[in-house]
Amino acid sequence: VAAAERRLRVAERRAGRGFAKLSLLARDDGDASGAEVLLRRALACFERALGPGCGACAPLLAALGRVATDRGHSETAEACFRHALGVDEAAFRKTRGFRLDGHSVSLTSRSNIVFAHPRSASHLASI
């Protein structure tokens, strides 16, 4: 049973990567709604394989935010970017043992906001 579950998680990750790549093609062709559908499928695959709070989901959430921006859905875009920010920060703190006392790698913006994950500043800038 464990081996079958492991193979299923691998297959889910592969499918997720495939959907994500197809979403790039759809977005490049100007098909934002198609890109959104494919990104949501990719996100669902990664969440099933790795769990909803996995750091691998954050780039997909950010991509969903960019597609929502393309479509003029600013509230949805903001929600996606905020979710991506939260996922990145939580995953990075969990894996890196981030401490707020400054004894770990961090990125500080001009407003003195400390991020655990270097990609987090780009999510915040997109909001």
Image (cartoon, helix red, strand yellow):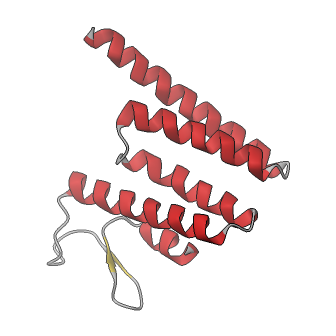
Write the residue at 72% across / 46% down: 35
Residue 18, given in percent of the width and then of the height, sits at 62, 31
Write the residue at 37% across / 63% down: 86
Residue 72 figure quarter:
bottom right
Write the residue at 60% across / 55% down: 63
Q: Would residue 119 be visible to someone looking at this image?
A: no
Q: Quadrant of the C terminus?
A: bottom right
Q: Would residue 9 be visible to someone looking at this image?
A: yes
In the depicted structure, whether residue 79 falls above or below residue 2:
below
Residue 28 as seen in the image, left or right of residue 79: right
Write the residue at 64% across / 71% down: 74
Q: Quadrant of the N terminus?
A: top left
In the depicted structure, whether residue 1 falls above or below residue 104:
above
Q: Residue furthest bottom?
A: 111
Counting labels gives 0
In the depicted structure, whether residue 118 falls above or below residue 18:
below
Residue 106, given in percent of the width and then of the height, sits at 30, 72
Residue 16 as seen in the image, left or right of residue 98: right
Residue 78, given in percent of the width and then of the height, sits at 55, 70
Residue 116, given in percent of the width and then of the height, sits at 30, 68
